[in-house]
Amino acid sequence: MTTLTVEIDKERDLPVLQALLSRMGLKFQVEDENDDWGDLPEAAIEGIKAGLEDFKAGRIYTHEEAMAQINEKINSHKAHG
């Protein structure tokens, strides 16, 4: 037996591909990439994916850098308030 993995970007193409595979008499299984996310809402999944892209692109801060920025903003508001 040989296994073939196919990734589809456009969900609208999935029914056509399923019909083709069925006509050819091939067994297939459809796995949705969102299945790995459990019961998370779509907005949460998209937020996590965006965060991962930020990480890959180097758009990240250490805890210390983030806290320094937060403290700077707090102190700035205290000084002007």
Image (cartoon, rainbow, N blue to C red):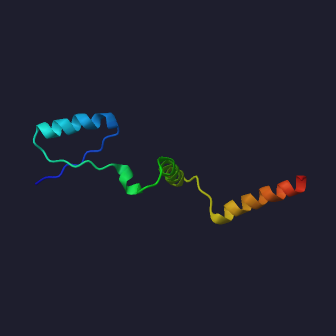
Residue 71: image location, x then y, percent: 77, 61
Toward the viewer: 60 or 33?
A: 33
Say left or right for 10 vs 52.
Answer: left
- The residue most toward the bottom is 64
Q: Quadrant of residue 20?
A: top left
For the point 22% across and 49% down, the residue is 29
For the point 33% across and 48% down, the residue is 32
Q: How many numbered marks are there?
A: 0
Residue 7: image location, x then y, percent: 29, 44
Quarter of the image with the N terminus is bottom left
In this rendering, is residue 64 above or below 19?
below
Say left or right for 15 vs 25.
Answer: right
Toward the viewer: 11 or 60?
A: 11
In this rendering, is residue 5 above or below 16?
below
For the point 84% across and 54% down, the residue is 77
Residue 24: image location, x then y, percent: 11, 39
Residue 70: image location, x then y, percent: 73, 59
Say left or right for 68 vs 62.
Answer: right
For the point 12% across and 44% down, the residue is 26
Q: Quadrant of residue 22?
A: top left
Toward the viewer: 31 or 41?
A: 41
Toward the viewer: 37 or 54?
A: 37
